[in-house]
Image: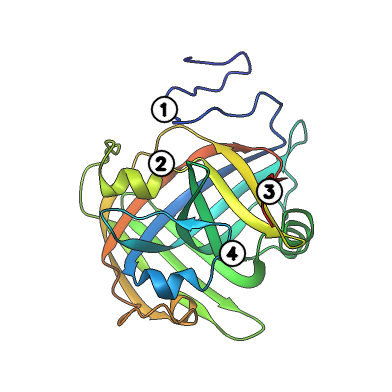
């Protein structure tokens, strides 16, 4: 299909994107991907019954991703200074429904009260307000820090690159973790699904130094050392558009 009339390149996406106009534009920048293999049974407890865990070679994965949400805004609206850009730290896992792979967020901690209120209400996304900061540049590395005001849960550390940048090949763990173009959430008791579009990730291997990670530890996923991820990657980021989250037929 190549490039659509609206300018979106879609050849790299394994399922059709909506034909309707996207509703939100945003940039995901200065990302560090921290991943652990986890017991599927422990992870299953955090998912709605209608979703199936997506496994890679029999293993379930959970990721903690500190990054900068940059210039998020509705279609046709300019970014709003002080509101549209903020630090975000999310915990996600990998799921599939009706053959469409996606992500499911256990939490999205963000330094934006507007986003935390609106995204919870409008989309059912589990945003929580936290003082989140991501600083640094790709070549020298990123430094990140977050703490929830409500319960003190947070993450502190840094990462620096250890390889050249590359793109993931189908069939690899990195392709499984990164090349996700949809998300699932529960809103008003019903499973919803939405699409996200961006170009393929450019990423590199990385090493991390984590002083504390009560953010991941708080979900009781059986991770013996939340300060030592099994897999660490970094990316300068991607530009993203998203569509409405819609209820799935037949899902409770």
Disc 1 target residue: 12
Q: Nearer the viewer, residue 194 or 119?
A: 194
Q: CA distance from mark 3 to mark 1?
A: 29 Å
Residue at disc 2, secondary structure: loop
Disc 4 target residue: 48
Name which residue lies at 29% across and 36% down.
170
Q: Which mark is residue 250?
A: 3
Residue 250 percent location from the top left of the image: 68, 48
Residue 1 percent location from the top left of the image: 48, 14
Q: CA distance from mark 2 to mark 3?
A: 27 Å
Q: CA distance from mark 2 to mark 4?
A: 22 Å
Closer mark to the observer between disc 3 and disc 1: 3
Q: CA distance from mark 4 to mark 1?
A: 29 Å
Q: Which mark is residue 179?
A: 2
Q: Earlier in the sequence, mark 2 or mark 3?
A: 2
Q: Nearer the viewer, residue 29 or 232?
A: 232
Mark 2 and mark 1 residues within 8 Å of each other at the beta carbon: yes
Q: Residue furthest front?
A: 250
Quadrant of image for the C terminus: bottom right
Q: CA distance from mark 2 to mark 1?
A: 9 Å
Mark 3 and mark 1 residues within 8 Å of each other at the beta carbon: no
Residue 4 percent location from the top left of the image: 57, 16
Q: Earlier in the sequence, mark 3 or mark 1?
A: 1
């Amino acid at each position: 299909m190549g490039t659509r009339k609206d300018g979106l390149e879609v050849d790299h996406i394994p399922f059709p994107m909506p034909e309707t106009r996207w509703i939100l534009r945003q940039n995901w920048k200065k990302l560090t991907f921290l991943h652990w293999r986890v017991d599927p049974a422990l992870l299953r407890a955090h998912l709605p019954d209608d979703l199936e865990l997506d496994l890679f070679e029999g293993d379930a994965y959970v990721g903690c991703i500190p990054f900068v949400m940059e210039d998020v805004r509705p279609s046709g609206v300019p970014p709003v200074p002080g509101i549209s850009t903020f630090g975000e730290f999310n915990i996600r896992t990998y799921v599939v429904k009706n053959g469409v792979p996606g992500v499911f967020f256990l939490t999205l901690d963000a330094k934006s009260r507007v986003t935390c209120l609106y995204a919870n209400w409008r989309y059912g996304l589990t945003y929580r307000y936290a003082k989140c900061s991501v600083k640094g540049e790709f070549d020298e590395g990123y430094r990140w820090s977050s703490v929830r005001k409500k319960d003190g849960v947070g993450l502190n550390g840094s990462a620096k690159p250890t390889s050249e940048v590359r793109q993931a090949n189908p069939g690899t763990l990195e392709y499984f973790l990164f090349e996700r173009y949809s998300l699932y959430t529960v809103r008003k008791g019903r499973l919803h699904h939405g699409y996200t579009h961006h170009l393929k990730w450019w990423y590199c291997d990385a090493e991390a130094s984590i002083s504390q990670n009560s953010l991941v530890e708080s979900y009781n996923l059986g991770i013996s050392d939340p300060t030592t991820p099994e897999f660490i990657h970094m990316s300068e980021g991607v530009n993203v558009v998203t569509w409405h989250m819609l209820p799935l037929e037949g899902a409770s």
